[in-house]
Image (cartoon, rainbow, N blue to C red):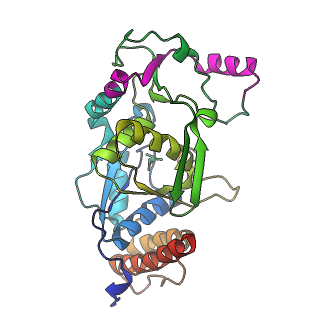
Amino acid sequence: MILAVSSLKPPHPCYRGRFAPSPTGPLHAGSLASALGSWLDARANQGTWLVRIEDLDAPRCIAGMDQHILAQLQACGLTWDEEVIWQSQQLTAYQNAIETLYSDRQVYPCACSRQQISSVLSSQGLLRARNQEQVYPGTCRNGHVWQAQLPNSDSPSAWRLALKPDQWIRFSDAELGPQEQNLNADVGDFVLRRADGIFAYQLAVVVDDARQGITHIVRGADLLSNTARQIYLQGVLGYATPQYRHLPLVLDPHGEKLSKQTHATQIDTASDAAVLQALQTAALHLGLRNLSDGQDQTIAEWLLQATHAWADKTKQISRTQN
Ligand code: GLU
């Protein structure tokens, strides 16, 4: 099949995208849709696409799942352009970032348990509904004596970022349009290193996106609420902020997000026909209609057709947003 290259955007001078799965379960219809959206966006921009394994939270990771996810991506033809990196091998970079913030007096140790945080908030009449994130009331920040201890792995406390006052973070999401969040009111000083010594997702993701020169982040809308924190952290660490695009979530029949926790079924990669079926479902979910069903195509041909469809769709979105 021949497709006109003209519908692709000219090569983006520095487009670098990524897919960053946590090896806590196999790819399911939801994570495949995110991977496909991110891959298509990179290919439509003639950019570079990376895969990073986010395996810091060791207790939640499943042995061998990293290789399984990589094999699933490969079976789907979602190939990457540079060596895969594992976050568990980048600990020095996260430590350096937290020490930089410490020397700037922007992080402090916190020994509060969840329960202590809840009781302070309830005494202030600020307790939130179950499942809603509690805004840290700043208890340890107020009592902290600087120079008391360095944020190293021996310290038994969590380390929190001391937010500057009045932090309204505003950004334009390429899919969802203008977004804003008041970090002080909605989140509070958030954790960069947990009390068990594990570096928090917010820190690691920001450090790695910067080190890998990521310019475009395309991921599921479940991560939208983290974005303001990440933009703030990029600012205090002196990193550039990438362009964000948050994709619609795949929901189960009960309206819940498909997730590893709810044991979503893994995608079927047993045959090319099954892969094409999974890709087709993911593409429909991403709003790519009128694609051929792949019956008479190879996976590579189908992906090329989807790349052109993605380029056309994103052109339309940016026209309506401008
Ligand atoms: N590791 C995260 C996850 O699997 C994704 C992080 C990101 O894309 O920023 O949900």
Query: What x and y, as percent, mark residue 239?
Result: 34, 44
**Image height of 19 relative to 270, above or below:** above
Query: What x and y, as percent, mark residue 108?
Result: 45, 19
Q: Quadrant of residue 211?
A: top left
Query: What x and y, as percent, mark residue 73?
Result: 36, 61
Viewport quadrant of the N terminus: bottom left
Viewport quadrant of the C terminus: bottom right
Task: Evaluate whether residue 300 shows in this view.
Answer: yes
- Residue most extreme to the left: 83
Residue 108 in the magenta stretch? The answer is yes
**Image height of 9 relative to 221, above or below:** below
Query: What x and y, as percent, mark residue 132?
Result: 67, 36
Which of these two is toward me, 5 or 125?
Answer: 125
Q: Quadrant of residue 91?
A: top left
Which residue is located at x 57 percent, y 17 percent? 113
Q: Is residue 219 left or right of residue 88?
A: right
Q: Is residue 203 left or right of residue 116?
A: left
Residue 110 in the magenta stretch? The answer is yes
Which of these two is toward me, 68 or 189?
Answer: 189
Which of these two is toward me, 43 or 238?
Answer: 238
- Residue most extreme to the front: 166
Q: Is residue 49 left or right of residue 220?
A: left
**Image height of 60 relative to 81, above or below:** above
Which residue is located at x 30 percent, y 43 percent? 86
Which residue is located at x 45 percent, y 9 percent? 145
Q: Quadrant of residue 71?
A: bottom left
Task: Report the magenta residues as a range.
Answer: 99-127
Which of these two is toward me, 257 or 62?
Answer: 257
